[in-house]
Structure formats: C-alpha cells, structure tokens
Image (cartoon, rainbow, N blue to C red):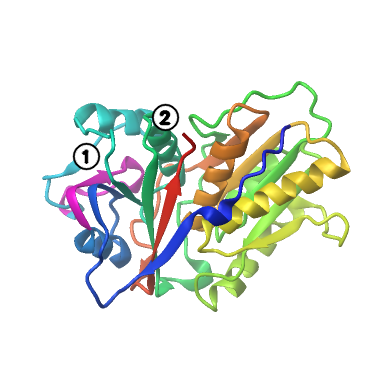
Amino acid sequence: MEEPMIDYTVFYKEKLPLDDVWEPRWDLLISSYNLSDRVLDVFSRANADEKRWLVLPDYDFDTDELPPRENVHLADTRNEADYILDFFGANSFSLDGADVCVDITGFLKPYMMFLLKYLKHQGVKRIDVLFSEPAHYVKKEDTSFSDEKVQEVRQVQGFEGIHDTDTSNDILIVGAGYDHKLMMHVAESKDSARKKIRVFGFPSLRPDMYQQNILRSTKADDTFGSISSASDPSSYFAPANDPFVTASVLHDILVHENGLRKVTNLYLSPLATKPQALGFTLFYLFEMDGGAASMIYPFCPSHSKKTSEGISRVWRYTIEFPR
C-alpha cells in the first residue's frame, strides 16, 4: 500500500456560537432528519438558500413524526448508494461552484460516507460539514443507537476497495463507540485478520462520555483479542470531535503497521462519533480509495430516533477536495 503524505492540519475547524447569528451562508444545506434537539435546532438556525431533509427509512418514522413535506426527501431503499442517488435524481441542484453544507449529526454513517464521495465525484471542491454535540445521551452508557440486531456486515457502497489475494497481514481498525455488540459483529466478521485495532474517542465529546465509552467497549474485548504494548499497540486515541486528527491518527497507524510488516488488506469500520466517522471517510477518500482497503459496517434493521437531549457545541469543518 502506498502511504501518501496528507497534511490534515490545513483543514479548517471552528466552533459556531449558540447565542448569536451564524455568519456562514450556503447555497444548499443537506441534513438527515431525526428527533434529537441538536438536529432540529441546527436545521432551523443554518442560513441556506435551499434546505433539504433526508428522511432515512432506517429510522422507521411514523407519518405523524415527519416534518412538513416541503423540502423533504423520502425513499424506500435502505441501500445508501441508491438512496443518495435517488435524492440527487429527484432534485435538480446545480453543484458547480455551489457552497454546500452537510449536517452529519443525524446521518447514519454509510449514507454520510456515500454522500461525501458522491459530492467529491461530482466535482464539488469545497464543502462545510456541521456537527452538533449533545448535552448528554438519553441513557448515558446504556444508550442504544440501533436495535443491535445486525443483519449483515458488509462493505459500504463506494468504499469497496480492490483487495489483495494475500491475506496474511490483514488489519482491521475500528472506531470504538457505545454499541459494543456492533463492534463484536465487525470483529467476528474479520476473524482472520492478523490484528484488530480500536481507536477510542479521547478527549470525548463530554467529560463523562469517555468513561461510558470504555465501559461499553470492554464488553467487546474478547473479540479483539490483542493487548496493547508500547512497541505494538492495538489501542489508539483521537479526539471525538476532530475528524482531521482522526484521519492523521489512521495515517500514522498504517505507517506504523507497514513498518512492522507490509499490510496486505486494510479494513476500516467507524462505529464511534460522527466526526470520527468523517475522519475515517476522509482518510479513505484521500489515501485509500482504489487500494486494498474497504470500509465495512454492521447494518441493522432500525435505529433510534432520539439518542440525545440538548446541544452543547456546534462544529463547522471545512473540507477541500484535491483538484
């Protein structure tokens, strides 16, 4: 695997004020609808000429839970690629030179990942990504983000990679989140991987969330097996709210592992926060796309409509795709 040098520190990150008008204005805002305060508040506050709600079928909304039908996209498919393509096929957006903003807070990660790849493929050079941090999760460490009934672990559409027939040094890297059962399914799906690595969110979104994360993650320890050592770690840390540091950490992990022994196939599975999943996505798009690497994800029949209460901070990440 090649290891291109990407300087993720050039990307811009800022905290948007909660008590003042936001200065940025966009041509198009895309957000995924759910019932969390932080999703609804950002959609209302953002300044955009056009705003679109994506109502993902995985949330299983009742009709009376949906927002007003104006500017709402509904599609029956639960395939992330088909859904995003259906959205753009049903709307005649001019993306050429447009200021596009994506609020990833309510997105299910595979949809978010394919959306970003689609925008890059369509020639969008620069996008803003928003993420709002919760005041707290509704059930702390017992919060469920899905029903945890995994139907399959598969590659995310558009992130399949071209894999090597040599599997002697396959590596799995998982963003460690609250759903320990999902982590177990992913680890078991790549049981033949020589090494399984977890990236924990630290600093966490809120002071108590790191401990909650660890409490849940330890339940998956048996499926990861390896124990960290100074020379050969299997646990790493990246800020839960910084996609750019996360991408840099993933780059460093790959460099380290290749230094020990050439990695044959790399599997990535972002199961932690949305900013960390964004970091996994950027790392893949900038460094792994078309190589022996895949993004894999545990797909569940349904997801929780409201996992958090309140809003503590809103982040704006500015991403520029290579020309």
> Given the current orientation, which residue lies at the most extreme top position?
165
Location of residue 122 in the rendering, given as x and y in whole percent from the top left corner: 36, 29
Let me know if residue 296 appears in the view: no
Q: Mark 2 points at which residue?
A: 121
Q: CA–CA distance between discs 1 and 2? A: 21 Å
Name the kind of residue labelled 2 in the image.
His
Q: Is residue 258 within the magenta segment?
A: no
Q: Give the range drawn in magenta.
A: 47-64
Side of 267 where 153 appears, left or right: left
- In the rendered view, tell whether residue 166 sits above or below residue 230: above
**Foreground residue among 269 and 224:** 269
Name the kind of residue labelled 1 in the image.
His
Q: In which quarter of the image is the N terminus?
A: top right
Residue at 83%, 35% in the rendered image: 262
- Where, by quadrant of the figure, is residue 161 drawn? top right
- In the rendered view, tell whether residue 1 sits above or below residue 237: above
Callout 2 environment at 10 Å: few (<14), some (14 to 19), or many (20+)?
Answer: few
Residue at 11%, 45% in the rendered image: 70
Helix, strand or loop at mark 1 = strand
Mark carried by residue 73: 1
Q: Is residue 48 within the magenta segment?
A: yes
Location of residue 215 in the rendering, given as x and y in whole percent from the top left corner: 63, 69
- In the rendered view, tell whether residue 164 sits above or below residue 11: above
Side of 152 where 61 appears, left or right: left
Helix, strand or loop at mark 2 = helix
Q: Do the residues labelled 1 and 2 touch (CB within 8 Å)?
A: no
